[in-house]
Image (cartoon, rainbow, N blue to C red):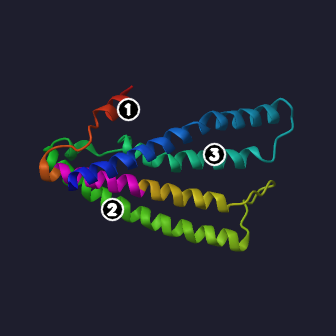
């Protein structure tokens, strides 16, 4: 019963993270368009925009931060393989659990700071120091959401690894994710 509840939780987190990760990837063509438009406007029309640089920074920040949990789900982050690949799978689970718990701690700090920065941005009406001067509060909301997503994904990963450590079996078949990553 506990294993079934853990599996349902992990599958729900996987679905949420995949939905957001795939959705935010749709911002990439818009980012490319904004950058291309700025280049065209600046060099061909000799009329640079005041908004393209700030908008492209925000879009890239959204893509990178909100895509972090999806990258974790797909195990696309950098791994130090010198020792990791030479130990048995259960020892790898211990390594993973320790590193995921450390990452959760770090992301909890990022979440706390993002909420504080959001409150500051609202209170003091923070804007980017540029000619366009867009508001900054939306960026800190996004960082808080990205932190929560990564914490959820990491907690799911901790539970998956703990089940593997105890039972020697995986509760979710990751081969479908690994195949998608390789392609």
Q: Nearer the viewer, residue 16 or 49?
A: 16
Give x and y (percent) for residue 149: 45, 54
Rendered residue at 71%/49% (across/down): 54
Left or right side of 134 for 173: left
Do labels 3 and 2 touch, CB within 8 Å?
no
Q: CA distance from mark 1 to mark 3?
A: 23 Å
Q: CA distance from mark 3 to mark 2?
A: 28 Å
Q: CA distance from mark 1 to mark 2?
A: 25 Å
Magenta residue check for 84: no
Q: Label 1, on which residue?
A: 181
| Marks 1 and 2, the one that precedes in the sequence | 2
Rendered residue at 28%/48% (across/down): 7
Q: Secondary structure at mark 3?
A: helix
Magenta residue check for 155: yes
Assign the magenta stretch its main secondary structure.
helix
* Number of other residues with Cα within 10 Å of mark 3, as a class: few under 14, some 14 to 19, many 20 or more: many
Rendered residue at 76%/37% (across/down): 38
Q: Secondary structure at mark 1?
A: helix
Q: Which residues are magenta?
A: 151-164
Q: Secondary structure at mark 2?
A: helix
| Marks 3 and 2, the one that precedes in the sequence | 3
Left or right side of 152 for 6: left
Q: Nearer the viewer, residue 122 or 126?
A: 122
Give x and y (percent) for residue 92: 19, 48
Which mark is on residue 102? 2
Q: Label 3, on which residue?
A: 59
- Quadrant containing the N terminus in the rendered view: bottom left
Do labels 1 and 3 touch, CB within 8 Å?
no
The correct choice, above or below, for 148 with respect to 47 in the image is below
């Amino acid at each position: 019963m506990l294993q079934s509840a853990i599996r349902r939780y992990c599958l729900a987190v996987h679905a949420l993270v995949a939905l957001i990760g795939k959705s935010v990837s749709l911002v990439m063509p818009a980012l490319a368009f904004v950058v291309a438009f700025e280049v065209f406007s600046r060099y061909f029309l000799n009329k640079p925009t005041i908004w393209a640089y700030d908008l492209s920074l925000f879009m890239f920040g959204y893509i990178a931060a909100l895509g972090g949990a999806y990258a974790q789900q797909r195990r696309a982050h950098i791994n130090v393989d010198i020792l990791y690949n030479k130990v048995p799978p259960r020892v790898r689970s211990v390594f993973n659990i320790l590193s995921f718990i450390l990452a959760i701690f770090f992301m909890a700090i990022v979440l706390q700071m993002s909420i504080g920065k959001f409150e500051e941005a609202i209170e003091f009406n923070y804007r980017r120091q540029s000619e366009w001067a867009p508001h900054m509060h939306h960026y800190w909301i996004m960082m808080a959401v990205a932190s929560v997503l990564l914490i959820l994904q990491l907690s799911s990963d901790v539970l998956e690894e703990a089940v593997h450590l105890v039972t020697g079996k995986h509760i979710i078949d990751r081969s479908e994710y690994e195949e998608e990553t390789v392609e």
